[in-house]
Image: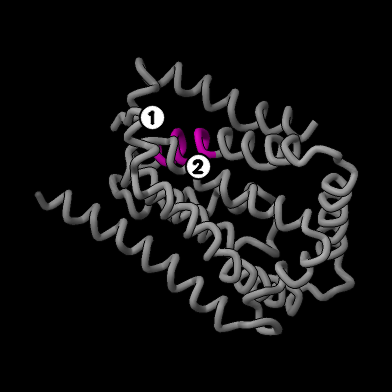
Amino acid sequence: MLTIETICIFLIPAYCFFVSLYKNPRLILRQRRYTWREILRSPLILTLVFITLANIPGINLLSQLNTDGILCIVGEDSDLWTNYQRMNDFTEMLLANSNSMILNIVCMAFVPAICEEIFFRGLLQTITTNIVKNVHVAVLLVAAIFSFLHGDVFNFIPRFVLGVFLGYLFIFTQNIFYPILAHCLHNASVVLLSSVTSYSEELETIGTTDNKVLLGIASLLILAGFTTSLITSLSQNTQK
């Protein structure tokens, strides 16, 4: 059901808009084309795998700080917090009741990554860039919308940071495949870590202020450094 909703909410509208706005939508999604041999040989693939794994402590730290900040405002007795906990319990129940890890990854990682990246980075970021005439502003605006539409204020900041990273990755590579891959790797890591029941609690809190916070800080520095390198490369290419 969630997979169908994701397709209906993001992929189908994106397809309709692309067809109505652009003569050849593929030129928007794949301004720079790569062969599968080039993709597999590209060091960017291994870099994205490393960034995904290294980013786990940093995301945990941002999530904790975001959650604690919201709780200071609304309190643990609020309906907002209750609904958030119910959603987490529902997600854990889905993962626990599924007998297929591959199905979980397809439904919770692969499909959402494709649908959301085509909608947010491929369509919305392209349209926003054309309107505001500034790629950096467009990336930030779409990242904020991306995070807001998930309806989870307790994790707005980590999703926003992820959205910024994916936005610059799309601009740098000029191919929607790479943001989809990075998004899929991130979601798949969450699904896989949730399935490792004996270490799930440790992995879910690593990098937070209660569990190796220096790892969380180092993780965020790695992501910031990589994103900065993308921005620097874009600026150098623009000046040429």
Image location (x, y in percent) of residue 155: 66, 62
Q: What is the chief secondary structure element of the magenta stretch?
A: helix
In the rendered image, is residue 138 in sight? Answer: no
Q: Which mark is residue 36?
A: 1
Residue 152: in magenta span:
no
Q: Amino acid at mark 1?
A: Trp
In the image, taking residue 222 as reference, residue 105 lies left or right, namely right
Q: Residue at x 34, y 43 (%)?
A: 42
In space, the residues marked 2 and 1 are separated at their CA atoms by: 13 Å
Q: What is the magenta range?
A: 117-127
Residue at image position (65%, 28%) is 7
The residue labelled by disc 2 is: 181
Q: Relative to 61, does residue 196 appear above or below in the rendering?
A: above
Residue 123 in magenta? yes
Classify the position of the N terminus by image quarter.
top right
Residue at the left extreme, as displayed: 240
Mark 2 secondary-structure assignment = helix
Q: In the picture shown, does residue 216 fall above or below 142?
A: below
